[in-house]
Amino acid sequence: MKRIPKNIDPASIDAAEASANGVPKAGEAEATENIAPEEQLENVPPKKKKKALKAVCIIVGIILLLLIAAFVVYKIYTGKINHVELNLTDEELGITPRENLASEDAPEEEGEEGETEPETTANTDDITNFALFGVDPEDYNMAVDVLRSDLNIIVSINKTKGTIKCISVLRDSKVPIDGYYPQKINAAYHYGGAPLAIKTLNQNFHTDIRDYVTVDFYKMEDVIDLVDGVDVYLTAAEANHIGIGYEAGTYHLNGYYALQYCSIRSLDSDIQRASRQQNTLMAILEKARELPVTSYPEFVAQFLQTVETSLTYSELMSFIVAGAVDYEMTFYTVPDADYETDLWGGIDETGSWVWVYDLDAAADRIHSIIYE
């Protein structure tokens, strides 16, 4: 027999036992209706509270994506996003079939009867590759469609692994260009725009790129200012060259100075120039990730005004989302003296300064990066 302390209502004990057994107390439903939502949340068990907060985050994320989508659709239909339909065959783009890419450099494993067969190390359906070109009309005083591409990056997004890999092919790389003599790879964009530039990447590095994004660096000034500038480490020579200081260190660059930094040519080599562009792109992405969600639509709308692209609306949206969330981003450079052992840089027979290296070996390295 239970002993009931004085001043304790036996009915309250019965109610507590009923509650412990999953039976609601009398009047509990009615009482809950009169409790404020925030007070109800305080009484929710931690596990349920976590689920509730996760649901709220998902809802906010969906609203954000819809808001960005509305801006993108508006910009597309008002002509403020320069969308281009390529409508070219794989042959016209010089594409290497993806099944060849996946197995070309994969390790071999022994079969049942001692035979070896390639082992695919990545699910290629999860991987999307496209080309990112960077041009600067102000630099050449030309229209965008007759420029040379200062930036030539193979962008590979793996949605399953949550990675973005950016492989920068240096503009001075000497390569064969369909219909023209071998010369700097940036000339392909000058001769045939994005289609020939894509074909040149595919033919020389055995890739399967079908789409592109071309960024007008001259228009990026407004985008950089929109994220309130970027923090970039400058050498003393770089700081002095763009007129912002005389000592090495991290500088806060507005749009104007950031583009001056990206355009430095005379201090060193094309490798350092590509590295500066990569540093700036990474800094912009990091600042964009720090923006409040309410600022995303304006940022996306402003950024899209600087590009020309063949990507569809849904593809564009998925890549924007990938960049906005915490995907791991890594940069690589081709050629790289640590890998291209036969690398040579100098003046060729045409009088141009070029990089010469084994293109097939470079293609193998690119495949290993993308499909590891």
Image (tube, helix red, strand yellow):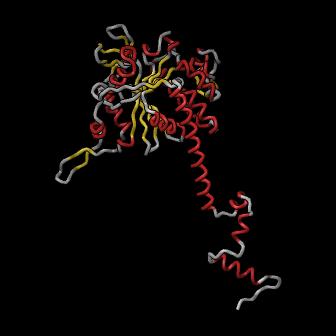
Residue reaching furthest to the front: 77
* Image-based side of 223 in relation to 149, left or right: right
What percent of the width, then of the height, locates residue 42? 70, 60
Residue 362 occupies which quadrant of the picture?
top left
Q: Which residue appears at 78% of the width and 82% of the height?
A: 9
What percent of the width, then of the height, locates residue 104? 27, 37
Between residues 134 and 38, which one lies in front from this camera angle?
Answer: 38
Task: State which quarter of the image contains the N terminus.
Answer: bottom right
Looking at the picture, does residue 144 appear above or below residue 340?
above
How many dots with numbers? 0
Q: Is any part of residue 73 visible from this angle?
A: yes
What percent of the width, then of the height, locates residue 103? 28, 40
Q: Which residue appears at 36% of the width and 41% of the height?
A: 372
What percent of the width, then of the height, locates residue 370? 38, 37
Q: Is any part of residue 361 visible from this angle?
A: no
Residue reaching furthest to the left: 113
* Image-based side of 125 in relation to 286, left or right: left
Between residues 257 and 233, which one lies in front from this camera angle?
Answer: 257
Residue reaching furthest to the right: 7
